[in-house]
Image (spheres, rainbow, N blue to C red):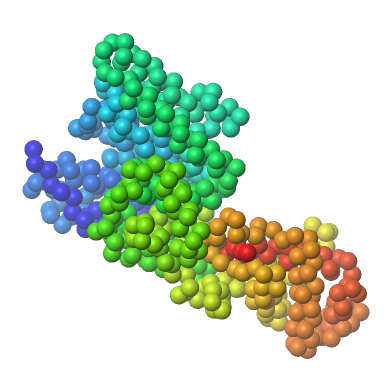
Amino acid sequence: MTRAKPKPKQAVDAVAKALAHEKERRKSELKPIEIVKIAISAYQSFNWNSALEPIGEEPGGHDAPAEPTCMQSHETSAPSPSPIAESDDRAGLRRGTQASIDRLLFNVNYWRAAYEDRIIDACSSADDARRCLRAISAWNSHTMKLNTLSDHEVIVAFERFCPPFATNNRRGGAERAGSGKGPVQDFRTCAHSVAEAMDANGRGNGDSLRAIVADVEAESAIYETYSDTASLDALYDLLPAWCLQDRIELVTGTWWNDADVMCAIADALRDRFAEMGYAQALCDYFRDTMSEALDTYQRELSTSDSPLAACEIGNLISAVHDVRESNPNTEADGYGPDLPTWLSAKEQLIWNTVVCAVYGPMHARPLLADNLDLLPVEGKPVGTDVITELAQRAYVNYLGARRAAGERPQFASFALQPEDLRASGIERVQSIPDKLRVLGYRIIPLASCYPNQRIGSLRPSEVECLAILEHRRWCEERTAAGWTPAEHKDISAKQSPYLVDWDDLPDRAREWTRSSVRDIPALLASVGLAVAK
């Protein structure tokens, strides 16, 4: 029977319809990562159903969108034509089942995705191949039930499964690696058993399967070097190498190449971030970075073939690392002549979709950050909305410190302060870049900051230095605003007992100032910025 090719417009209509249905059903309470899951599920389901429709028999006429089947939660769709063997995961991904999409987005079954084709080719029977594929899969049938998880639990799940070293130690920790408690160990045991049976029965040569075991273990050893690295830092190194190798569904999915579908996902994420209370400037910034990445990637699609795809993963990681070391501006300038022109754009498109959906829009990685007013690069100011958001967060930290000391602040929130005090808080935030420059530090996008550049916390001597500078700045700012020294604080009279030299400040007031500068790295990280060397 001749099959009809999926119609691109109908595919994006199916995605939009699925998102609208779920938003109405859930009353706008979808988590961002659920939005991505539903969109990809609808896209895959539509393509699957379209591939099964005879030409001329599309329901509802040629232009009517197909009914999305993204609400499937079990692996129960009708069987499909398949090669000699196929994993449950790959079959589910083709049909768009939500459990399989969960596993894809969280990279749960990295090893299965990376080695499925080779395993099938090496096995002499479908049964042997399926045994090996089940052994190398962390999960064969599981839904993460994202709607029941808190935002923190979603992050924990992502960090537990996304990096391959975390997945492989999922049932025992690093101290039990090699004890048959992860997919690499399980696969080794199963593959050697199958290889021995193949040799003994004359059904093939088990050496091909043993070679795969050796390659899996060698790759696993590379990932284990990241086991003490934060998950996002590890992913930052690994994602471009995976894009070059082009083996796992996380990077090979055809939805990345569909501009209309990706625009629909980006728009839905931006709207959801706004509903969740993120600053409008931050939401728009996320959308701008997605547009830049998508536009660049679409321009470079015709050059998508890469001779590096056959290289070992360790060599690819090293190649990307070397380019980044020699050119710190790879976010804007790309990876140079030795790596494909599309790499930076595709890597950032995937990162901005998955990572931002898990961690928030502040983790978006721009292609041309220096062209946007949101970030303080090349002397440009931080966008006003972000400054206000930082001032609000700083005040929340201040309230927490005061209450922890058993004190009761006069104003319960930033918004309840008089305009004069709110302006003072904003000026304090605006002064952060100048204070950091005294230490030789700068502010850059968090996601483009190399781990060895990032300043996660200030040393005690640095805290003391910045606290003294901050107090001097505050005294000058308050004096210019008409405040005068007095024994007791009187806001209406603009009087304060703290308009004195640092050495004359009460201990508790000095600690308030130290606390405010000590929090600078975490405060900036909350809106996607990093303190860097």
Quadrant of the image for the N terminus? top left
Residue 66: % across, % down: 21, 50
**Residue 522's spot in the image, x, y percent?**
65, 60
Q: Nearer the viewer, residue 303 or 357?
A: 303
Residue at 50% over, 63% down? 328
Q: Residue 62 location in percent, x, y?
A: 12, 54
Above or below 115: residue 290:
below
Residue 311 visible within the image: yes
Whether residue 150 sits left or right of residue 440 in the image: it is left
The residue drawn where x is 84% and y is 80% is 499
Q: Dividing the image into 4 quarters, which one contains the C terminus?
A: bottom right
Question: How far across and how far down the image is residue 291, in percent?
Answer: 37, 66
Looking at the image, which residue is at 53% across and 26% down?
178
State whether residue 130 appears in this view.
no
Q: How many marks?
A: 0
Location of residue 492 by image quarter:
bottom right
Q: Is residue 400 left or right of residue 499?
A: left
The foreground one among 332 and 42 is 332
Question: Eyeballing the image, is 346 above or below 462?
Answer: above
Q: Which residue occupies the extreme top position in the image? A: 200
In the foreground, 424 or 434: 434
Residue pictured at 41% horizontal, 48% vertical: 316
Instruction: Identify which residue, 438 or 257, lies in the foreground.
Output: 438
